[in-house]
Amino acid sequence: PPPVIFEDDRTSVTTEGLKRAFYDHLFYTQGKFPEIAGLGDYYQALAHAVRDRTLQRWISSVADHTATAPKTVAYLSAEFLMGPHMGNNLINLGIYDTVKKAVQEIGLDLNELLRQEEEPGLGNGGLGRLAACFIDSLATAEIPAFGYGIRYEYGIFYQTIMDGWQVENTDKWLRHGNPWEIQRAEWAVEVKLGGHTEQYQDDLGRLHVRWAPEKTVAGVPFDSPIVGYKVTTTNTLRLWRAEATEAFDFSQFNRGDYLGAVDKKVTSENLTKALYPNDETVQGKELRLEQQYFFVSCSLQDMLRIHKARGMEPDTFDQKFAIQLNDTHPAIAVAELMRLLIDDNMMPWDQAWGITTRTFSYTNHTLLPEALERWPLDLFKRILPRHLEIIYEINARFLNDVRIKFLGDDSRLARLSLIDESGERYVRMAHLACVGSHTINGVAELHSELLKQDVLKDFYEMWPEKFTNVTNGVTPRRWMVLSNPRLTKLVSETIGEGWITDLPQLSKLEPHAEDSAFRDSWRAIKRANKVDLAALILRRTGVAVSPDSMFDVLVKRIHEYKRQHLAVLHIITLYHRLKSGRSAYTLPRTFIFGGKAAPGYTMAKLMIKLINAVGDVVNNDRDVHDLLKVVFLPNFNVTYGQCVYPGADLSEQISLAGKEASGTGNMKFAMNGALTIGTMDGANIEIRDQVKAENFFLFGHTASEVHDIKASGYRPRDIYEVNAELRAVVDLIQTGFFSRGDTDVFKPIVDNLLDHDPYLLLADYQSYIDCQDVVSDTYREADTWARMSILNSARSGKFSSDRSIAEYAKNIWKVEAVPITLKPEKELYM
Ligand code: 8GP
């Protein structure tokens, strides 16, 4: 039935107003009427109606920021793994329930509409998702901020599983358009690439350098609103898309080479075509360096434009912008800001360098050596000739300081140099980031310590005062309120709603752990969430799992250091015990895996195949009596995470100590009441500190023990020889039991474990198995488990990204909240 209410208020949030807006957009935006519209149209109509409701706040924020020019954060990140926008916007706008009702009255189901959204998967994993949580917290804290990144046409690949193997498919997330973005063609900028540099004299006879590029591409910004939770502040996520510059098209066109011009156009647009799907390994590809430089140059030019538009000169830039480098992907910004200040704004070197080093700070996200970015010098010079000159100059001045501080220490000079000259020459991006930043931080206490002791030791000795820690966090808006409405309702009814923006208030739940009625409600919620998760699993894998079994979950990128295969050794251990009649009763467990392997990472792909192969055998063996189920949920992403974390009983955080910088999934699980089995790694240590040892299942060697084991010559095969149960387990894989007798498939895994085992699976095996036995015994005591579950959630307050952002704001960025007054629409558009 058509709506009847017509209001003047174009962004009314009454049910009637929302229904009217929905029909308006179905008609005027989608060009459809109900009889021919599909679910996709309904989603788009609703999305536009919701976007309209962000605009009054968004424009009010921009208007205030423009007028008062407050110090602004620019979070530079090659990845923003946002996940679906709609649900989050409904929560943060405070209109979830009204919209649900409006949609219902129209005869539709909000959840079904939410499922229509193609999630923007513009990130690989932890690093990209952290950026998304951080911009949510920035807006909620009312801090003026931009997220700057790349608008990849194809995000992280879509994973399917065929015959147990990962298959990658392109992620066509933009195929139905993106209602959450506004293209700002008028703020496009030009980015140079390649060519050479030349010196010239100005009218006063001073020498300058000019960059004569081989080509230029245009960067076009696409803006999405980032609405703070129940505040007016709405910040901007500005993602850049590469396009051909008009100048280019024309020059070729005029020479009559029309197809050549089109070809060039395609080449330019290739720049932002696809996200590199590698998590923690570098791909020394030219296109990747171009992507990095492209978005950095676009973003810095944009900030300088805004700065000038606010009536200020470049010499005050550092007072108005704090730029965070999310890992080294944007580290070229240090040289680019220097170039813009020196070459384009004619600023003297020392002044420019002062501004630059007061502007940047750098977050490191990994200790893995294979993730440290370095670019072959020749490649770098070919693409960024001017930046190489600037880097040489930065390096010369820097090494001079080193020489003075550590006289006579030549090997230190070689270690610290921005240029690696030990063999083929490389530009070291982490070094550039360290030299150009006033603050350097790791993402959990252990990680920040290890940075100082190991990866960045020489920089720590040079500038100890630059180093600090900011432990990661995750946004409770997406990861509790949106993902777990049942728990949110119970918690808010029990302690009020303050926890949503002040997560430590969850501690008020602690006394309720002793209340049996509360524990019953708590368990009923977990059970209902497990029913939902079981339904998702059935839909995506065809495997029926019982919500009465323990849901034991390991979801994250697939990597040897994260040790998904250690969890597989545990599964096979239980299976072997059942088959050999060694345990009369095993607790029913459902092992749920999810995560993507980098397409070129053979071992990680083999780990996926192993999980599926074991699942095939175990799930179908009648002797097991459905006590064990193993599922691999394909294409784990933010959307699935929202169903997985709330439905987990046990969170597996089993990386080798000293390898996982922080982890953030561990925090999402704990908040939602899962207990953790984990090593002393990353933020696990801090989670255990908070929830207390008795509510955490700890196993494995510590980082310093790992160091000692390796130093004294680790021989994994010795462990295999003496541990009979482990031997039986490895032999099952080795003899082809899970591969229909094929002894070749899993040979690389087995050989690696027995002869190298760089991630010490065998050294941690027994401790893990023993710990898992304790987990099973504890889970059998449903009441004990519920108490522990409540305490985990109640004590997870530290792990809100609001806390992380408050620390960055106060200690690193020196920025403050700028409350925004909502202006009447009429005032804004007149
Ligand atoms: C990740 C770390 O592995 C993880 O421990 C941490 O929680 C997360 O960053 C956020 O700090 N690192 C990466 O995701 C990473 O290095 N990704 C590569 C794509 C660069």
Image: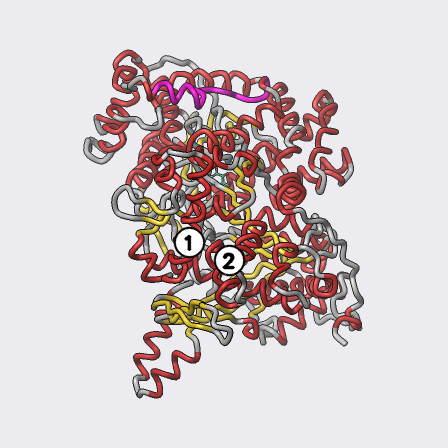
Q: Going by the image, does 392 lie left or right of 442?
A: left
* Marks 2 & 1, CB-CB < 8 Å contact: yes
Residue at 77%, 76% (x, y): give it: 830
User: Which of the two residues, 526 or 276, is positioned nearer the viewer here?
Assistant: 276
Q: Vertical placement of 768 versus 640: above or below?
A: above
Based on the displayed image, in which of its 4 quarters is residue 248 positioned? bottom left
Q: Position of residue 525 (x, y in %)?
A: 64, 34
Identify the colour scheme used.
secondary structure
Is 696 contained in the magenta span?
A: yes
How many badges with numbers are in the image?
A: 2
Front-lying residue, 435 or 247: 435
Give coordinates of residue 39: x percent, y percent: 55, 63
Amino acid on which the number 2 mark rests in the picture: Trp
Which image quadrant: the N terminus?
bottom right
Residue 593 image point, x, y percent: 43, 36
Q: Name the residue under label 1.
A: 393
Q: Residue drawn at (67%, 37%), measured in percent from left and top?
A: 487
**Residue visible at 35% across and 28% down in the picture:** 759
Q: Which residue is outermost to the front? A: 205
* Label 1 crowd (10 A; few <14 / some 14-19 / many >=20): few
Q: Which residue sits at x=44%, y=39%?
A: 402
Q: Name the residue under label 2.
A: 349
Nearer the observer, 300 or 577? 300
Give the residues in magenta.
Answer: 694-709
Left or right: residue 453 versus residue 621 is: right
When the figure is inspected, residue 277 is found, relative to residue 806, above or below; the finding is below
